[in-house]
Image (cartoon, grey):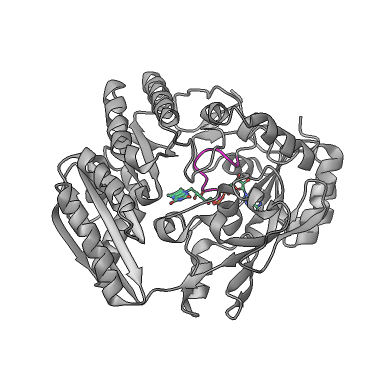
């Protein structure tokens, strides 16, 4: 039941920073997932003090609060399953400091990834974890999801780049976690605990992030394969060889066809392609890495192998990969590209088998699935292309995902590489974390005894998803 005191909220954040119009509530009830639930009100704070006051009020009155950045999460992380207040953090979007001597920057959580990188570019540096959604994803959302991207294979994920942060706890208290230094040995690494916590432990109001120099040289290559298995094995061999790719991406036949339908890239429609890149300050070193990767691709029957330093050529290939997700919706006009349990990670030696498994399971269940991802980091994505009006397709999708996740766990893989758990993957997450689920619950209760921050997520999420006849469906129905 909605028990929120709107006049009190207006006192805290001001008249213009509150929305409760039904159409706004509907829009904020979903993210980039297939889930939906109605919030009670949307509040957009401008300052840390407002966040503190708001959390203290919510805690006192046991009202759920769901922090939200760009809303690009794919698993329902910001969907308010228990109702409550959506805390839209996009208003806190200032870059507070770019400190070149100490090699860090301080930012507010609502800063959009691309905006940060645009600002850093003037100093010849970049923030590497950047996901493909960098035009909309915020630093707060990336921290809460431990986002990663094409260059994480060399430079790491968000968790590696976060040095420290300021967090408002559920009771309104403001704490500083971590440090402004590269090393910090004392005590529990609480700032790292916040990374990947999906807005369930605290509200990030400031982050201190490391950055790295933009490399002088970047060379990008492509290798085509007649078999997905060969491409998967090439990934494993590249990573086991000691090569240092700055990008190693897989795209399968479904992905290639979708990209060709939406962009004029003229990609060869083969079973799979690998996109690889090396970067650095010394050209000979980059040449060395690229040649090593080319040779490994050749050994695994790669064809049409080429590589280029030309920025235009590189941008063309990169664009195809970056816009893959929206492109998948054009694969077939009758089929929607649906994010359900859409990412995972497996050990390198299982990459080929994993990619094959996705296609095998799709065929068995009469749906189309694609295998792609930042495979150099061990990450594999899939999207289900299906007729969302057909109930039987939802059932097939669910059966397919269950089988795929059973496989992932059987080879010591993980339920989430970078897209988080939210609602879509909760069932599998609980099985995967069976040994530590009580410990996770203990940490949550210690920090949030009234269970107000993003309740009903991670280990609290419902086991069964509701299968619906349209794309967006309510977890409450
Ligand atoms: C086209 C597309 C491509 C994508 N590609 C990638 C990719 O390459 N790699 C990748 O990792 N992900 C990818 N994603 C998923 C998603 O964009 C990322 O996980 C991103 O980090 C989410 O950021 P956001 O600001 O949109 O967060 P939201 O979706 O708004 O929120 C995500 C989570 O963060 C929490 N949160 C938000 N702000 C705060 C805060 N200030 N304090 C505490 N918690 C907070 C929310 O409660 C929620 O649990 C993609 C999504 C799309 C739509």
Q: Is residue 13 left or right of residue 373?
A: right
Residue extent of the magenta highlight: 70-78
The quadrant in which the C terminus is found is: top right
Q: Is residue 293 left or right of residue 324?
A: left
Q: Is residue 378 above or below residue 320?
A: above
Residue 194 x/y as whole percent: 66, 49
Q: Nearer the viewer, residue 313 or 436?
A: 436
Q: Nearer the viewer, residue 70 or 106?
A: 106
Q: Nearer the viewer, residue 424 or 403?
A: 403
Quadrant of residue 411 in the image? top left
**213 magenta-colored:** no
Q: In this view of the protein, can residue 5 be seen by the observer? A: no
**77 magenta-colored:** yes
**Total marks in image:** 0
Q: Is residue 335 left or right of residue 188?
A: left
- Residue in the picture at 37% in, 38% down: 382
Quadrant of residue 408 in the image? top left
Q: Is residue 72 above or below residue 434?
A: below
Magenta stretch, main secondary structure, is loop
- Residue in the picture at 41% in, 20% down: 395
- Residue in the picture at 72% in, 62% down: 46
Q: Is residue 342 above or below residue 10?
A: above
Residue 473 x/y as whole percent: 52, 29
Q: Is residue 139 above or below residue 121?
A: above
Q: Nearer the viewer, residue 172 or 447?
A: 447
Q: In this view of the protein, can residue 217 be seen by the observer? A: yes
Residue 170 x/y as whole percent: 78, 46
Residue 157 x/y as whole percent: 50, 55
């Amino acid at each position: 039941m909605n028990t929120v005191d709107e006049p009190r909220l207006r006192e805290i954040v001001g008249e213009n920073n509150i929305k409760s119009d039904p159409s706004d509530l509907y829009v904020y009830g979903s993210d980039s997932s297939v889930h939906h639930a109605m919030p009670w009100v949307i509040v957009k704070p401008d300052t840390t003090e407002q966040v503190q006051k708001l959390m203290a009020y919510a805690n006192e009155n046991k009202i759920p609060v769901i922090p939200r950045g760009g809303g690009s999460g794919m698993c329902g992380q910001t969907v308010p399953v228990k109702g409550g207040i959506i805390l839209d953090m996009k208003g806190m979007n200032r870059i507070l400091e770019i400190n070149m001597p100490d090699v860090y920057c301080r930012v507010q959580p609502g800063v959009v990834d691309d905006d940060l990188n645009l600002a850093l570019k003037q100093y010849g540096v970049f923030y590497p974890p950047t996901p493909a959604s960098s035009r909309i994803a915020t630093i707060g959302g990336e921290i809460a999801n431990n986002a990663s991207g094409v260059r994480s294979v060399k430079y790491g994920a968000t968790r590696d780049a976060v040095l420290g942060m300021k967090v408002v706890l559920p009771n309104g208290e403001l704490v500083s976690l971590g440090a402004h230094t590269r090393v910090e040995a004392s005590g529990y690494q609480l700032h790292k605990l916040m990374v990947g916590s999906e807005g369930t432990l605290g509200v990030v109001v400031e982050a201190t992030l490391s950055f790295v120099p933009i490399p002088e040289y970047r060379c990008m290559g492509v290798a085509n394969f007649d078999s997905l298995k060969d491409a998967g094995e090439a990934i494993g061999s590249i990573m086991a060889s000691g090569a240092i790719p700055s990008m190693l991406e897989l795209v399968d036949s479904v992905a290639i066809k979708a990209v060709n339908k939406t962009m004029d890239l003229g990609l060869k429609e083969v079973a799979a392609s690998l996109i690889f890149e090396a970067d650095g300050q010394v050209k000979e070193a980059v040449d060395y890495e690229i040649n090593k990767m080319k040779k490994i691709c050749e050994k695994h029957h790669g064809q049409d192998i080429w590589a280029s330093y030309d920025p235009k050529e590189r941008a063309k290939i990169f664009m195809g990969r970056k816009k893959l997700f929206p492109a998948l919706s054009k694969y077939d006009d009758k089929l929607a590209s649906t994010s359900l349990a859409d990412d995972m990670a497996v050990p390198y030696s299982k990459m080929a088998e994993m990619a094959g498994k996705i296609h095998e399971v799709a065929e068995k269940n009469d749906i189309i699935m694609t295998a792609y991802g930042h495979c150099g980091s061990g990450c594999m994505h899939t999207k289900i292309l299906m007729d969302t009006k057909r109930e039987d397709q939802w059932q097939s999708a669910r059966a397919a995902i269950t089988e795929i996740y059973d496989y992932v766990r059987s080879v010591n893989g993980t339920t989430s590489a970078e897209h988080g758990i939210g609602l879509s993957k909760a069932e599998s997450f609980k099985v995967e974390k069976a040994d530590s689920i009580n410990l996770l619950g203990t940490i949550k209760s210690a920090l949030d005894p009234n269970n107000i921050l993003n309740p009903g997520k991670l280990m609290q999420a419902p086991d069964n998803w509701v299968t619906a006849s349209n794309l967006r469906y309510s977890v409450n129905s």
